[in-house]
Image (cartoon, grey):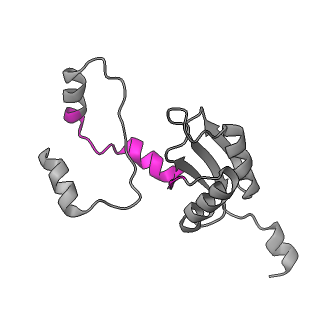
């Protein structure tokens, strides 16, 4: 393939969310979302958007997911002078999460009945799958 043809060929870009841990919590590790957007754009990510002061951002890139976390964490530390854990999830992973809740309908109904004021469903993302022993304790309510 000629260089010109390769250059013109559309590169498939994936949409990702990056979740930063421990920024803008209780007035510590303050990061302005505009500065976070600039950092991500500087890494040549497109369509960068942030959500309030949460430390969450979405972007698109043709880079592989496996390379993103380390790249972003390293650039973040250089830019802001402290480290933050970085989790990357694809748009598809978020879609699957909402479409296939890890709870049965009866479990959601039971939780809503227990506290009708509750209006949120919380999800926690882990960097690695939990150890089996730890997961068993959680399931047993220990």
The residue at the point 74 percent across, 51 percent down is: 41
Out of 101 and 4, give the one closest to the viewer.
Answer: 101
Quadrant housing residue 119: top left
Q: Is residue 135 left or right of 27 when viewed as pictured?
A: left
The residues colored magenta run 84-107
Out of 34 and 116, give the one closest to the viewer.
Answer: 34
Residue at far top of view: 117
Residue 87 lies in the magenta stretch: yes
Q: Is residue 39 left or right of 17 when viewed as pictured?
A: right
Q: Is residue 24 left or right of 62 when viewed as pictured?
A: left
The residue at the point 63 percent across, 39 percent down is: 50
Q: x, y percentage for residue 92?
A: 49, 52
Q: x, y percentage for residue 114?
A: 19, 23
Q: x, y percentage for residue 140?
A: 12, 48
Using the image, determine if residue 135 lies above or below residue 27: below
The residue at the point 57 percent across, 52 percent down is: 16
Using the image, determine if residue 13 lies above or below residue 55: below
Quadrant housing residue 8: bottom right
Residue at far bottom of view: 1
Using the image, determine if residue 118 lies above or below residue 29: above
Residue 121 lies in the magenta stretch: no
Out of 30 and 115, give the one closest to the viewer.
Answer: 30
Out of 128 and 1, give the one closest to the viewer.
Answer: 128
Question: For the image shown, how many numbered marks are present on the structure?
Answer: 0
The residue at the point 71 percent across, 39 percent down is: 34
């Amino acid at each position: 393939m000629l260089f010109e043809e390769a250059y013109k060929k559309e590169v498939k870009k994936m949409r990702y969310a990056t979740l930063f841990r421990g920024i803008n919590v209780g007035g510590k590790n303050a990061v302005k979302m505009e500065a976070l957007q600039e950092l991500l754009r500087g890494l040549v990510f497109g369509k960068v958007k942030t959500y309030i002061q949460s430390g969450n951002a979405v972007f698109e890139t043709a880079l592989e997911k496996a390379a993103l976390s380390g790249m972003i964490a390293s650039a973040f530390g250089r830019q802001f002078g402290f480290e933050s854990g970085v989790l990357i999830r694809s748009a598809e992973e978020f879609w699957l999460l909402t479409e296939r809740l890890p709870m049965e309908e009866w479990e959601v109904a039971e939780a809503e009945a227990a506290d009708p004021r509750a209006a949120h469903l919380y999800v926690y993302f882990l960097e690695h799958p939990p150890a089996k022993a730890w997961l068993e304790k959680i399931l047993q309510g220990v």
